[in-house]
């Protein structure tokens, strides 16, 4: 995975709470293969009307926000279904960071596994960021090492689980880490066969 | 290895038993005892293929057809080919990797979170994962069970382990006894309304108190199922004699002397008296009324005796905006009585409320009555369907005018084509009232099976207690 250090990019305001993963990618698109790209389905029912025409006043259809790599939303972003496709849709669309006051736990770990930064800010700071974006500011600077968000003269701090920060900064993949623990896993399973045989050996 | 002196929570004890390795930064590599896969797990299998890797422990991996299972016809040649393709893809992936599969036409097929307990794939003290957020359900047996994404599915397939940072311990205690007409669904929705849909993020919830220990396994499964709707990745209940009695004699449970030995270990799985919890929430069971949701998040819940909120009276800007958005999407008016809300259809099913006890509760209200609106009843598994038919429950639903169909996730998530038409309003026993969850522009009100049955009878949201005179 590509390491994430700093990001200086356009941002789009999404002033809604509880933008759940069903909204990020509706279930009907999830039969598709990832190779087709999921970006076209991101927030589909917010972006398009029943005739598949773009809804003019939706943030991602605003030409000013074209090319945005940062999304700013209200609390409980990415709640709900564990579908990693929600993260694929954001990443394939071009997003590299979501700023919100709180995130679904499964969404956050899926995000980090795909190099997308879930940056947690206070509700007050989220409101201020939304106001700045709606008031004419277009770009945001993110410093992951310092956990800082900068817009013009404003500086906001964000929180992220330190383990995830390290993983993003280095572009680490869990599988690379686990590959050195093969012997420990085998040893654990062998010992557990004695301790909890009902967990390790099942009837046919 | 770190030392574990001092009092432990139930969660700590199970977690500690599964540590394979620890990193200095606090991440721990956990062994996974049970991995459940479904049609949506194809991204995980694809990653496995990309890496040319094998399933590490096919004997601990279980494939179950549920998300796309058709409910009206079981002949796969008769259904939408893209949906059929999702089902055969899972069956093929499982067979190719030597994974046990409960396929579409297996008599044990059903929703993964119903089949797991039914077959005793789910056991106390285990770690259980699945690429589905409602995996929290299995915590009802005193297991650490949580939903994972596709990258994690691939990691478990390849290594039978996961790197995790331990969540913070939280306890929710339901004291006393529940009033008639009130059940596990109402307990869970009351908790979510109290703490918020993100209230338990980063926490593992232990449910305790007399109103929890007196619940059946079905009730505990409903309660733990909805943990994720409060933001917690998992919820659990300490195993007791109810748990052990439920497991006895089930296909994949230990048998004979091994069950006795396991039961001795399971009885020790409880939080120590002085164990520390980061957060504690106490709810009086007697204060809980039948609950319905009015909005687009499970936290938008109120007792059926309540009224739709007035956004103009909510001081917080973000929360007021959410209430306006919800009222607009749901087509309601601020201040209207919840019992004035008409419904277009009902759905009884899903991993939340489709077990035999749920069907009995709905049938008790519907018996001898007609539904005023159409509806679907989809049992949680093919075995639950069979049992309900043995008990004659299907006749009650059919005589009331509802459709009695096969088992699957069905109208909870709409992937198999069972959807609520745009603009229609559904009283539903499911878990998510998100915008578009049951179909584009569909409007969902969550409630218990008995409350859905009451809404079916009157054609509007209804206090089931008004229809219960003399009934169970």
Image (spheres, coloured by chain):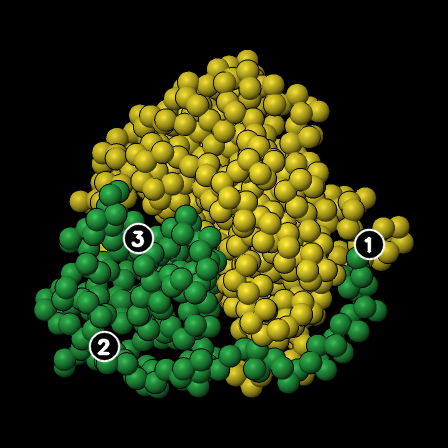
Chain colours: A green, B yellow
Q: Residue at x 38, y 51 (%)?
A: A26
| Quarter of the rendering occupied by the N terminus of chain B | bottom right
B134 with respect to A182 (left or right): left
Number of marks drawn: 3
Report whether B38 appears left or right of B329: right
> Which residue is rendered at x = 20% and y = 73% of the image?
A10
Q: Relative to B131, is B292 above or below?
A: above
Where residue B435 appears, as percent x and y from the top left, is 34, 45
Q: Residues within 10 Å of mark 3 (few under 14, many from 20)?
A: some
Q: Which residue is mark 2?
A: A9
- The answer to whether residue B431 is left or right of residue B97 is left
Residue A94 appears anywhere in the view: yes
The residue singled out by tag 1 in the image is A203
First in residue order: circle 3 vs circle 1: 3
Query: Is B262 situated left or right of A4 in this image?
Result: right
First in sequence: mark 1 vs mark 2:
2
**Dot 3 corresponds to which residue?**
A44
The residue nearer to you, when weighing B278 against B343, is: B343
Q: Measuring 54% from the left and 50% from the top, which residue is drawn there?
A: B86
Q: Do the CB atoms of the residues marked 3 and 1 lie less than 8 Å apart?
A: no
Measure how far apart labels 2 and 3 are at the Cα level: 23 Å
Judge whether B114 appears above or below B155 on screen. above
Numbered disc 1: secondary structure: loop
For the question of whether residue B449 can be seen, the reply is no
Q: In terms of sequence position, does the residue under pointer 2 or pointer 3 come before the other?
A: 2
Circle number at residue A150: none
Which chain letter matches label 2? A
Q: Quadrant of the C terminus of chain B?
A: top right
Q: Position of residue B359 (x, y in %)?
A: 59, 30
Element under disc 2 = strand
Q: Chain of mark 1?
A: A
């Amino acid at each position: 995975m590509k390491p994430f250090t700093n990001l200086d990019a356009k941002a789009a305001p999404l002033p809604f709470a509880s933008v759940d993963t069903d909204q990020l990618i509706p279930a009907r698109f999830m039969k598709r293969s990832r190779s087709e790209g999921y970006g076209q389905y991101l927030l589909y029912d917010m972006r398009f009307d029943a005739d598949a025409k773009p809804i003019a006043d939706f943030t991602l259809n605003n030409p000013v926000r074209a090319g945005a790599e940062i999304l700013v939303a209200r609390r409980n972003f990415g709640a709900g279904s564990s579908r990693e496709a929600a993260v694929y849709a954001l990443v394939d669309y071009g997003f590299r960071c979501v700023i919100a006051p709180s995130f679904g736990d499964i969404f956050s770990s899926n995000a980090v596994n795909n190099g997308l930064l879930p940056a947690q800010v206070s509700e007050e700071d989220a409101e201020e960021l939304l106001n700045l974006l709606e008031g004419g500011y277009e770009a945001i600077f993110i410093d992951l090492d310092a956990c800082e968000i900068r817009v013009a003269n404003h500086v906001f701090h964000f929180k992220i689980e330190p383990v995830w920060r390290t993983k993003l900064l280095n572009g680490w993949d869990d599988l690379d880490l686990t590959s050195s623990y093969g012997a420990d896993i085998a040893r654990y399973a062998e010992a557990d066969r004695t301790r909890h045989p009902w967990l390790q050996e099942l009837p046919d | 290895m770190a030392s574990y002196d001092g009092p432990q929570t139930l969660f700590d004890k199970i977690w500690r038993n599964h540590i394979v390795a620890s990193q200095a930064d606090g991440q721990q590599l956990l062994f996974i005892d049970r991995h459940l896969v479904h049609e949506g797990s194809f991204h995980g299998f694809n990653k496995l293929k990309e890496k040319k890797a094998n399933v590490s422990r096919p004997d601990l991996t279980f494939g179950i057809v549920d998300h796309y299972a058709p409910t009206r016809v079981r002949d796969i040649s008769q259904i939408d080919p893209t949906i059929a393709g999702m089902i055969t893809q899972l069956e093929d992936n499982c067979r190719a990797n030597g994974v046990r599969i409960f396929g579409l036409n297996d008599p044990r097929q059903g929703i993964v979170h119903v089949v797991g307990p039914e077959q005793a794939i789910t056991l106390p003290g285990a770690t259980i994962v699945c690429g589905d957020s409602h995996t929290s359900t299995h915590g009802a047996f005193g297991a650490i069970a949580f939903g994972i994404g596709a990258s994690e599915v691939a990691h478990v397939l390849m290594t039978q382990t996961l790197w995790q940072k331990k969540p913070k311990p939280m306890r929710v205690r339901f004291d006393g006894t529940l009033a008639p007409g009130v059940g596990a669904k109402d307990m869970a929705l009351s908790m979510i309304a109290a703490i918020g849909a993100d209230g338990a993020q980063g926490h593992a919830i232990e449910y305790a108190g007399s109103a929890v220990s007196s619940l059946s396994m079905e009730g505990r499964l409903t309660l733990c199922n909805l943990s994720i709707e409060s933001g917690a990745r998992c919820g659990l209940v300490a195993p007791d004699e109810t748990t052990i009695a439920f497991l006895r004699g089930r296909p994949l449970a230990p048998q004979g002397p091994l069950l006795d030995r396991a039961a001795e270990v399971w009885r020790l799985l409880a939080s120590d008296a002085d164990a520390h919890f980061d957060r504690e929430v106490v709810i009086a069971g007697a204060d809980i009324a039948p609950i319905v949701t009015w909005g687009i998040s499970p936290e938008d819940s109120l007792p059926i005796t309540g009224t739709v909120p007035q956004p103009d009276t909510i001081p917080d800007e973000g929360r007021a905006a959410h209430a306006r958005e919800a009222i607009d999407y749901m087509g309601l008016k601020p201040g209207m009585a919840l019992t004035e809300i008409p419904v277009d259809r009902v759905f009884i099913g899903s991993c939340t409320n489709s077990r035999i006890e749920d069907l009995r509760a709905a049938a008790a209200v519907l018996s001898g009555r007609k539904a005023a609106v159409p509806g679907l009843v989809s049992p949680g598994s093919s075995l639950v369907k069979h049992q309900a038919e043995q008990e004659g429950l299907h006749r009650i639903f059919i005589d009331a005018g509802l459709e009695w169909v096969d088992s699957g996730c069905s109208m909870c998530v709409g992937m198999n084509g069972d959807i609520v038409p745009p603009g229609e309003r559904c009283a539903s026993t499911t878990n998510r009232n998100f915008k578009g969850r049951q179909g584009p522009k569909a409007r969902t009100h969550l409630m218990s099976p008995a409350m859905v049955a009451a809404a079916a009878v009157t054609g509007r949201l209804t206090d089931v207690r008004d229809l219960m005179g003399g009934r169970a």
